Amino acid sequence: MLARLASLAIICATLAVQPAAAQTAAAACSSEAGPRATQILRCRDGLIVVAEDGARYTLQGRDGGVTAVDLQSKALLLDAPKQRGKNRFRVNTPQAIAAVRGTKWAVDVQDTRTSVLVLQGRVAVRRPRGGNQVVLGPGEGVDVDPGSEPLVVKRWGQARVDALLARLGQ
């Protein structure tokens, strides 16, 4: 019994540890409560992240700024200012990588699907293992499922857009 408790304590301690880059990135942001139990992060570099209640994500960064978010579940609404040079802010999910330069967009992770919706600007979306990449403009979205079939860009209906934004307190 003692061995089981010790093992459980080690597992819990391991899960609570974040990489140094994630801790540095989190320190670069202030947090406040938003509507509908959302969390709003305002970061030094102008990035704003609105996290759906219960969203699981980790901020990644370097040089005191946030450069990426690893999103495991639920949805984020992001407003990322244009970055210098060839740097592109990224959202990494189990099914997709969405990279941008100065835009506002939402990423929603469900069990086996990642959905990306662009509100302003442009977002490039691809699978983590490569394959075709699509570039989304305002009002366009893509659903990324596991597999290798080509990604299909669609104009989302207003009901779907409103439902996702409502979950994000918008």
Image (cartoon, rainbow, N blue to C red):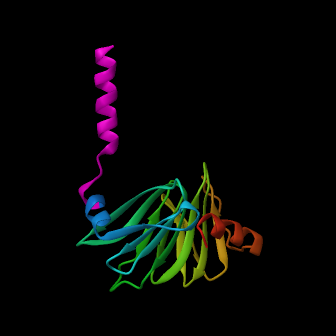
| The quadrant where residue 86 appears | bottom left
Position of 162 with respect to 56 (left or right) is right
Q: Nearer the viewer, residue 9 or 83?
A: 9
Residue at the image position 60 percent from the left and 48 percent from the top: 111
Q: Nearer the viewer, residue 133 or 41?
A: 41
Task: Quadrant for the N terminus, please.
Answer: top left
Question: Which span of residues is magenta-colored?
Answer: 1-21
Q: Would residue 19 be counted in the magenta stretch? A: yes
Residue at the image position 35 percent from the left and 78 percent from the top: 87
Position of 56 with respect to 35 (left or right) is left
Tell me if residue 21 comes above or below residue 80 in the rendering: above
Residue 37: x, y in percent?
54, 60
Task: Quadrant for the C terminus, please.
Answer: bottom right
Tell me if residue 169 comes above or below residue 139 in the rendering: above
Q: Nearer the viewer, residue 162 or 130?
A: 162
Residue 44: x, y in percent?
31, 77
Position of 102 with respect to 53 (left or right) is left
Tell me if residue 73 comes above or below residue 50 in the rendering: above
**Residue 18 in view in this figure:** yes
The secondary structure making up most of the magenta span is helix
Position of 5 with respect to 126 (left or right) is left
Residue 69: x, y in percent?
41, 64
Give the number of callouts.
0
Residue at the image position 34 percent from the left and 41 percent from the top: 15
Residue at the image position 39 percent from the left and 74 percent from the top: 42
**Residue 157 in view in this figure:** no
Q: Would residue 132 be counted in the magenta stretch? A: no
Residue 161: x, y in percent?
69, 72
The residue furthest top is 1
